[in-house]
Amino acid sequence: MQNDSPRSRRNTAPARHRRPTSTRGRVLRTAAAAVAGLALTGVAVTAITGDDQNATPHGAVDIDLRAQAEARAQAEAAARAEAAAQAEAAARAEAAARADRSARAPASSSPTPSASASPTAQPSASGTPKMTANRTTTTTTTAATPTWVIPMADAAITSCYGPRSGILHAGIDFALPAGTPVRAAFGGTVTKAGDVGDGYGISVVIDHGNGYLTHYAHLSTAKVTVGDQVNTGDTIGLEGSTGDSTGPHLHFEVHQGQLWNQIDPAPFLRERGIDVAC
């Protein structure tokens, strides 16, 4: 006999049970999840790393460019400072040079030597004095002033010193037209002027005070008187033909030591830089 009670019916219904989950399935699911997580993590890491890799070179380039710009700016500043220093040094040197030239200018332009210059004249081999001052040697060239001059320049010589017709012709005859000025061959004192009847006609004698006298004869007129002081080249008379003369000319004599001790004027004048064709 069957028991129809509800409890009996509940117990007699077929039992429903969950399918047991295998361990292998759990492991596979866990591994898949891990792999998926790792993949996602890798993507994130890759994304982050990629961004960093892309950003880092640009940042480094920017830093390098800034360093180069700063280096160029520093180099340019140093160059400008050096150029300014060089310009200032050049300006100081130029100012010093101008001051030195200004200090030297008065001493060089002044005709009177100063005590600091202390120039001394030293003869050179050619006879030209050299002025030495402050280690600077300058050669002063001046035209030589003749100590003696020919009494009638450009005149023809018609007779020289020496015997003539058994009589000593004691001088040199210079011929130019009558009235040509006759000059003193050297400075001195006039000791004779006029005609004293000695055959020389109107003549002038000059005592040069150095042991020599000169005599100028046959003048048409005398321009000086006894006692006059004459300089080299002064006009003392005009050429003529007075006294024992056959035509206008100047009879010129040189006396040594005393009057009437005539010597040959030609070598005497040559020794003093005057060449005469005798």
Image (spheres, helix red, strand yellow):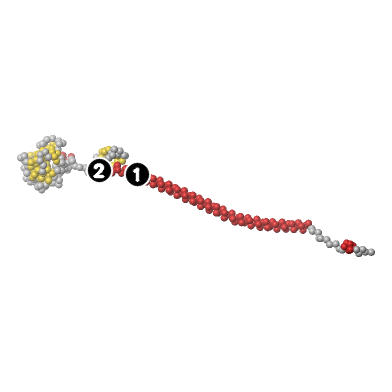
State the mark number for residue 215. Answer: none
Q: Residue at x 32, y 44 (%)?
A: 102
- Location of residue 95 with respect to 55 vertically, above or below: above
The reply to whether callout 2 and callout 1 are in contact (CB within 8 Å) is no
Residue 245 horizontal/vertical position (percent): 6, 44
- What is the quadrant of residue 173 in the picture? top left
Residue reaching furthest top? 257
Q: Image point 56% across, 53% down: which residue? A: 60
Task: Assess disc 1: are there few (<14), some (14-19) or many (≥20) residues with their C-alpha within 10 Å of its C-alpha.
Answer: few
Viewer-side residue, 144 vs 65: 65
Q: Position of residue 262 (x, y in %)?
A: 11, 37
Mark number for residue 99?
Answer: 1
Q: In the drawing, does residue 117 fall left or right of residue 268?
A: right
**Viewer can see residue 25:** yes
Q: How far separated are the C-alphas under marks 2 and 1?
A: 30 Å
Looking at the picture, tell me which residue is in the foreground, 187 or 81.
81
In the depicted view, which residue is nearer to us: 16 or 190? 16
What residue is drawn where x is 15% and y is 46%?
A: 153
Residue type marked 2: Thr
Q: What residue is disc 2 on?
A: 141
Circle nearer the viewer, 2 or 1: 1
Question: Dot 1 lies on which element?
Answer: helix
